[in-house]
Image (tube, rainbow, N blue to C red):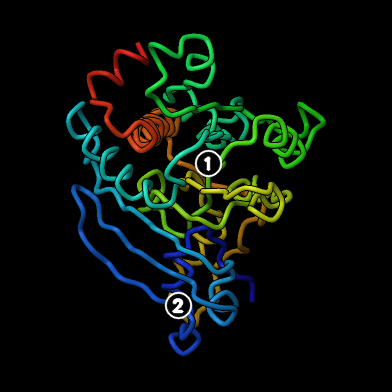
Amino acid sequence: MWERRTDLVLERQESADVGALAGVKSSVRRQGPLQITDITVLNEQGARALGKPPGRYLTAELPAGAAEGRENLFACAETLAVLLRPLLPESGAVLTAGLGNRAVTPDALGPETLSNLIVTRHLIAAMPETFGGMRPVCAVACGVLGDTGVETGELLRGVVDRIKPAAVVAVDALCARSLERLCRAFQLSDTGIVPGSGACNPRRALNEATLGVPVIALGVPTVVEARTLCADLVPEGKAPACPLPHEGLLVTPKDIDRQVALCGKILGYALNLALQRDMTAAEMEAYLG
């Protein structure tokens, strides 16, 4: 029996045997326009139950249409910023890594997020009298191995060794089990990330052990496996009327270009508000404009 694949810890918890979750603590609350599920994997027992390393995983679920319009978008971003701030070190430079392939829309969340990020490290160095009060932020779009010939982990380790940030924030597209969560569930964690997992092409893990600094992961599911969808349509205990699709076949929304652009804007704005704590929405728009 194959496992229905998901990168969302929330969905792994939903499908896990209740008796195996003794090493997991979770709670659900409403915060702003989002429903927040806060899951902590406490120990190795919990890690085995959910297939994820010990640490904290926050999933913010966005109701349909909740981010439409400027004010609603900022409300969602501010809620995510509130969740993100405790995961970040209080001071020091932050390197944001946009993972994924810009040329493949469902995998372009990382680069799309960087296009909405305010980078300040160079400004602070050049004009400290004007920008010295801002937190140093830098960014790198890692590309993919087929284009660069360089593993994301190798590239980031070199950048980290050079600029010595206090933390890395890695942004990547994920895979979900549920169609309803595509482009509407934002997962934050303090345990790092495995690049390419959303595209079923996992690479070397990015975490504190491999990069030498804390790694905060941000992700949004943009695809679901086709065979998962087919299996969900079959009544429990019955065989499908036709063979399940090949495991490499992924399904994504027909308006994925619009949705990835929206999710990238929400994540970029949330990062700006979390990193530059006194910044207003109007100031952020001015910087990005």
Q: Quadrant of residue 56?
A: bottom left
- x and y percent of residue 275 in the render? 39, 35
Q: Earlier in the sequence, mark 2 or mark 1?
A: 2
- x and y percent of residue 167 in the render? 55, 43
- x and y percent of residue 238 in the render? 50, 79
The answer to whether mark 2 and mark 1 are in CB contact below 8 A is: no
- Identify the residue at image location x=39%, y=48%: 186
Residue 271 vertical placement versus 61 (above, below): above
**Quadrant of the rendering where the N terminus is positioned:** bottom right
Q: Dot 1 corresponds to which residue?
A: 169
Residue 24 circle label: 2
Q: Between 55 and 109, which is closer to the camera in this rendering? A: 55
Give the total of numbered labels: 2
Which numbered disc, 2 or 1, marks the residue closer to the eye? 1
* Left or right for 233, reference 241: left
Residue lying farthest front?
A: 129
Q: Between 120 and 44, which is closer to the camera in this rendering? A: 120
Alpha-carbon span between mark 2 and mark 1: 24 Å
* Left or right for 33, reference 242: left
* Left or right for 101, reference 109: right
Disc 2 secondary structure class: strand
